[in-house]
Structures are given as structure tokens and as C-alpha cells.
Amino acid sequence: MAVFIAGDLRFCQNGRGMVDCANARGRQVTLRDVDSSGGDMTSNAEYIILVVGSYGAYFRLTKDEVDRRFPCIIVYTPDPVPEEDTISFVRKMKEKLDLPVLAIAESSPRSVKNLSLFVAGGCDIKWLGLRPSDVVALKMHPRCMRPMNSKDFKLAQRLLEKDAVVKQRPEWVEELKKMVETRSKVEVEALAPLGRSFLSNVYFPDKIVAQDWI
């Protein structure tokens, strides 16, 4: 398991000295790297931004140096389904640094399930976006949306009916219901038609200022 990190995070790695993710941008870090340091981490950040499965979002946020403009650590996990090591790594970061974790992922039932897995694994996170309500508020063009297939629809129904994490978060329930009603999912990259850097220069800053996460 490895995640990719950019931002204000430092830890000591046995045999390699201090690792500074602010300078080594996009550094690939494994759970073993952190465990070998005894788990010691330092940061002046105020948020951990967890990008789940969307390399395009991670690329745009780091290229536009969002972590230098806002006090945050950007963590990208490429796993289609988060592994236990990934969840453990993010949980360790949250516990050691005592920071909120704000998640960015596509608007889809699969993303909600992935966020639920993090919460069930002991890592309390908030859903920053992309959410169905954002799609409506931003008046995104229908061509930006992809139809949910039967597998997506069944997963959404299972999450609404049986997922203990989702059922405890009414805002997540409402967003899932919107997905079911529209039968559509939307990638974070679909924000690009609104502007190449819309994600990092408008969407993300507005969310942070308004503390718009659920």
C-alpha cells in the first residue's frame, strides 16, 4: 500500500532522515515508512485533504499548489477500494496530528461506500465533495454526468438500507437519494469545463471558507 502526499507534513524515516512532504511534493509514502519512524509526525496544517481514487483531482490540486495556499496536507489514495493499510495510515495521520480529514471523490455510490469504509475503520472523515447537491448548485451540464448502471444502483440501495455508517449520517443519505433520483454519477474532473483550475481556484477555496462539508 502506498499513498501520495503533498503538503506540510514531516516525519523521520529510519535510515533516510527527515522526510519533508512540502519539498518532496507528490512523495509516495507507505505505512511501513511511518511505522519505521515510530509514528512521529509534525505539521502546521489545519486540514488533511483525502483524495480518493481521483488522480485528476490530485494532479490539479498539487499542480496549482493548493497546499501552499491553504494550510493543508493533500493525500491521494489510488485504490479503487481502500485497503486496510490505507485506512490505517490515514487514521494514524489524523490521530497523530489531530486534524480533520476532508474527502474529495467523485459523486457516485462507490465513493460513498469507500468513505464509509474509512469511517468504519476508525477514521472519522467529512465529505467535502463532489456531491450531487454541488452538481445542481453549479448547474453542471448534463453531458458531464454518467448514467449509473445496475451495479451502481444496487450499491446505492444497499447503502441506504443496510450501511450503518451511512444511516448515521443523514446528509449522506440525502446525497445518495439524489444520486438514485437522477441515476447519474459525476467525476471530479467534470468540473474542468467550468475552468481548467476551477477545482483549485474556486470550488475548493469556497468549500473551505464556508466549511461546506458533511
Image: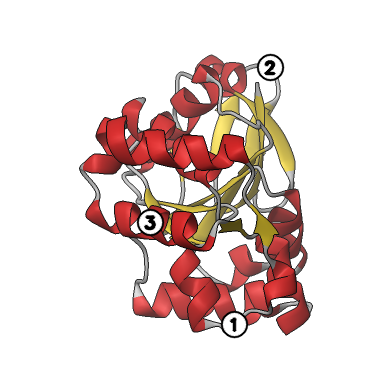
Q: Which callout, 3 or 2, points to the residue nearer the camera?
A: 3
Q: Residue at x 23, y 54 (%)?
A: 170
Q: Which one is closest to the eye, mark 1 or mark 2?
A: 1
- Residue 188 position by quadrant: bottom right
Q: Which residue is mark 1?
A: 202
Rendered view: 65 above or below 180? below
Q: Is there any visible trace of residue 134 in the rendered image?
A: yes
Label 1: how many Cα within 10 Å (few below 14, some 14–19, many 20+): few
Q: Say whether residue 186 is left or right of residue 180.
A: right
Q: Are marks 1 and 2 in contact (CB under 8 Å)?
A: no
Picture coordinates of residue 187, whole percent (x, y):
67, 58
Cα distance in 3D space between marks 1 and 3: 26 Å
Q: Quadrant of the C terminus?
A: bottom left
Q: CA distance from mark 3 to mark 2?
A: 50 Å
* Residue designated by label 3: 177
Measured as percent of width and height from the top left, residue 98 is found at 31, 44
Residue drawn 69% across and 36% down? 78
Indicate which label's residue lies in the foreground, 1 or 3. 3
Q: Are marks 1 and 3 in contact (CB under 8 Å)?
A: no
Q: Type of residue at label 2?
A: Gly
The residue singled out by tag 2 in the image is 15
